[in-house]
Image (spheres, grey):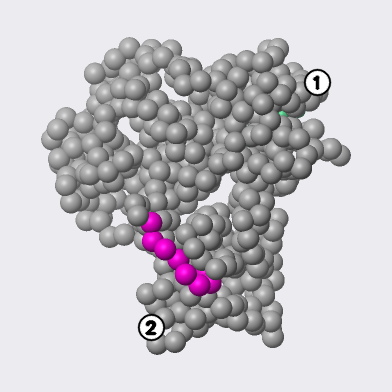
Amino acid sequence: MTATVAKLRVHTGTRTSPSWQDDAPRTRAPCALACPLGIDIPEATACIARGDPAGALRRVLHATPFPSCCAFLCHHPCQSACVRGAGVRPVAIRHLLRHAIDQAGPDTMARTAGPATGRRVAVVGGGPAGLAAAHELAMAGHQVTVLDRAAQPGGATAVVVPGFRLPQEHLHRDLERVFSAGVTLKAGFQLGRDFTLNDLAAEGFDAVLLAIGLGRPRPTHVAGDELDDVLDAKILLARAAATPPPAFTGDFVSIGGTGTAFDAARTALRLGAASATVVFPMPLSDLPLPEDDLRSAEQEGVRTLFLAEPVRILRRGRHVVGVRVRKVMPLPNAVDAQPIPIPDTEIDIPARQVCVARTRRERAPNRELASLDADEHGQLILDPVTHMTSCPGIFGAGDLAGGPRRIAETLADGRRAGQAIDAWLRGQGGSPRAPERPVIAHVAAPADPLEPEGVTWDGVETPSNLDPTARCRRASEEARRCLDCPCRQGCTH
Ligand code: SF4
Ligand code: SF4
């Protein structure tokens, strides 16, 4: 690593890129303050109200090159913060932005790259954090190369998130946006196997961003989880996305406190499972899944046991035959808190196959990262302002640096890392701090208000049975609910 330190040097210069911006919202509206990406939501809703979806999409693209993740995957803290939610329902921001993406067409551009700086940055990891950083760096005029061990970029959004939650055509459009900004992809390159950090320094990269995931699930300590029929949910979903996908038979149980547990259950049902049950350790109010995805899961037949935890996987020989679960008390609001079991509440659920969706993961051993300061789970320790690791010139972002986060937070983290590297390359010590965001209690969102009552539309796969003109009119009406909000004083409309 010493050689790497010596060759990754600080450059001096003046920030000239007109496209550089931080992710602090330009409005004081509570929705925008709550959005991890700082999207200017009042501006976007104003565009939709006047029938300009492309303008709304441009507002989103100012903050992220991945509008699909905002509109289809985000848990929408913006809506929970919307003051229209007091007494009535909040403005359906996420559905409005989804409508904008659908209607705007593919050619909407929001930002132009700054003048070329001649600096080169390697981004190791092609998931959302790495690509958000790569896009930010490219917009600042740097030459960026993303090295990813997978054959295709996108990380979990491309491999683990099923197409019924994130339409692939929207994701591909976002990926194209990143690479058409001048980012180069080297697919199939794994750190430690195909290249080292010293190789990157020898190739002349001025800075390196480590944005790889925390690959290894932490053990569950549930008896029986070593059986062949017990799979990690991410592995199961990656296999299900392959061609041909595996077939499921019999009952399926998905254990875990993440949205991935529901994705796995829905996937198993679609691939032939007789039933699917999610064993979820928290109450419904803590479900990290947008409500329309929960509704879709329930409509498809997924059953949920809230406030329940597995006691053991039941087996016959090497095969799973069920899961014994028990009720638990709600978790105290503390990191790593253990659920408190309620005595005499055990029941057995039949299962032919079980998957575990883990919130806690740790870093797989990698000699290349061994000399960087990290915590006991392998998460890199970073300077909170510069994103730099203990090795100058090497930066961190994403799961490896901050643990698993929700998608909008991951994209915001990647973007900030890109801005921090840009500041460092220009010889500016400072970099944008993450703006303080209010802690927002989640407010459940109603079904898509852009559709008439009684229509079952799961938002992604089933096309709206409203004609486009009627849907645009409803979108405009919904957006106009926002226009007289008293918090819009920061809005220029
Ligand atoms: S990223 Fe999330 S919080 Fe921000 S506007 Fe989109 S749905 Fe709302
Ligand atoms: S009414 Fe509009 S500006 Fe006000 S909080 Fe809701 S979405 Fe934001």
Circle on res. 484: 1
Q: Is residue 491 left or right of residue 374?
A: right
Q: Quadrant of the C terminus?
A: top right
**Residue sitting nearer the eye, 364 or 49:** 49
CB at disc 2 and ligand 1 closer than 8 Å: no
Q: Which residues are magenta?
A: 245-253
Q: Given the image, on which type of amino acid does mark 1 rest?
A: Asp
**Residue 179 visible somewhere in the drawing:** yes
Q: Identify the secondary structure beneath mark 2.
A: loop
Return the x and y of residue 309 as percentages of the image width and height: 59, 72
Asked whether 246 falls inside the magenta stretch, the response is yes
**Label 2 neighbour load within 10 Å: few <14, some 14-19, many 20+:** few
Q: Identify the secondary structure beneath mark 1.
A: loop
**Residue sitting nearer the eye, 478 or 163:** 163
Residue at position x 23%, y 47% from top?
190
Compared to residue 338, the image places residue 464 above or below, namely above
Q: Which residue is label 2 attached to?
A: 318
Quarter of the image holding residue 118?
top left
Residue at position x 45%, y 17% from top?
107
Return the x and y of residue 373 as percentages of the image width and height: 33, 52
**Label 1 neighbour load within 10 Å: few <14, some 14-19, many 20+:** few
Compared to residue 314, the image places residue 266 above or below, namely above
**Residue sitting nearer the eye, 359 or 421:** 359
